[in-house]
Amino acid sequence: MVRISSRPEGALDPEMPVMRACVRGRGYRKFVYHPNRLKYPMLRVGKRGEGKFKQISWDDATTLIAEKMKQITAQHGPASRFVHTATGVSGGAFSGNTMVKRLLNLTGGYLRYYHSVSMGNTAAATPYTYGTAASGSSLDTLLDTKLVILWGHNPTETIFGHTNHFYQQMKKNGTRFIVVDPRYSDSAISFADQWIPLLPTTDNALMDAMMYVIVTEGLHDKAFIDRYTLGFDESSMPEGVAENESLISYLTGKKDGVLKTPEWAEKITKVPAQTIRQLARNYATTKPAALIQGWGPQRHNCGERSARGSTLLATITGNVGVKGGWAGGYGGIASRKFMTGVEQGDNPVKARISIMNWMQAVDDASKVRPEDG
């Protein structure tokens, strides 16, 4: 590699805007141009941490790596080998993690992981609502939406693909933006007609209270719910499910004795109850509306609850499968195509761990069992 750029060459296409790199992406040029960039194999000759290395040949480096791989595999088995997420600047058809996995598969296999440090909770929770994680729509379908709620989503700073291009068009078209975020982000500055701050990790309480307002005030889309859903109330629960497991039973405290009112949520989120009521009413009565949640709010224990909350809000308001709506959840698009990569071969090792447990596996493999993942 001799040059890296975040701006493709050629004429601009107004229908498909130039995708600018995010701050992290722009920072990759420093990897390439930095004077201390590694260009040759370096072998440590001092103690770990001393920073003493000497240059060796590529033949010596590959021989040393191969010998160590064979030694580790013979002593500990192929499941002792692990390819961490994002290893070797992942994402390309021939990037480091792709080629390393191929190498390990050809030499006995390796310990795999599941979930993701980016959106693991969201990807796991979305199928519980929709039966699939592919709940997304392309951004051009939002040009007709009347209301967008950016929930923990900050594309102005993260440069989420060409999101800002479409959001700017929507703003010009008169779309109203509400930003729900503990931080007054650049997206709040750029787009928000209203900013609603809340305490971090309390998102699901705010969502529960919104649903409580929507259903108790009769603002839910009954026709959509009756036709497309199960589990909204006790009468629509599948046969064999225990009592008080429906959404309505949860919101009205039939099981835990707690009404999910705006006043209840205010104590948790510090968002005023009247603000919660108005947010719920705006979302339920504006057609179509899109609640677009970022992945930040789900990156903590029990983060799957807020991830699923966005899918439930979209469902009970009928904003699923309509132009200008947004189903929430993971947002993958099942029909999108990816570049064909190198055949990796079969991995003989069937064991897997959660990517969140890799540190425990390094410290003490006995701590990471199937029931821990």
Image (spheres, rainbow, N blue to C red):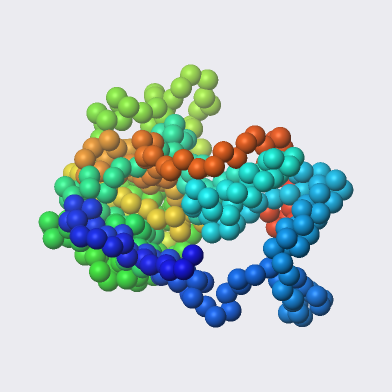
Q: Nearer the viewer, residue 170 or 198?
A: 170
Please state if 84 lies on the left or on the right of 281 as rendered: right
Q: From the viewer's perspective, is residue 226 above or below residue 10?
A: above
Residue placed at 73% from the left, 42% from the top? 107
Instruction: Please state the horizontal and vertical placement of residue 129, each as a whole percent of the image.
Output: 43, 35
Instruction: Please state the horizontal and vertical placement of residue 9, each as a whole percent of the image.
Output: 28, 62
Please state if 254 lies on the left or on the right of 323 as rendered: right
Say whether residue 364 is visible: no
Say whether residue 143 is visible: yes
Can you name the residue that lies furthest to the top here?
239
Instruction: Please state the horizontal and vertical placement of residue 205, each as a whole percent of the image.
Output: 43, 53
- Which of the 4 image quarters holds residue 55? bottom right
- Which of the 4 image quarters holds residue 206? bottom left
Residue placed at 56% from the left, 38% from the top? 343
Residue placed at 61% from the left, 72% from the top? 38
Residue placed at 52% from the left, 78% from the top? 34
Instruction: Please state the horizontal and vertical placement of residue 19, each as a whole percent of the image.
Output: 31, 59
Please state if 65 lies on the left or on the right of 315 as rendered: right
Can you name the residue that lies furthest to the right here?
75
Q: From the viewer's perspective, is residue 32 above or below residue 364?
A: below
Please state if 223 lies on the left or on the right of 236 as rendered: left
- Which of the 4 image quarters holds residue 338? top left
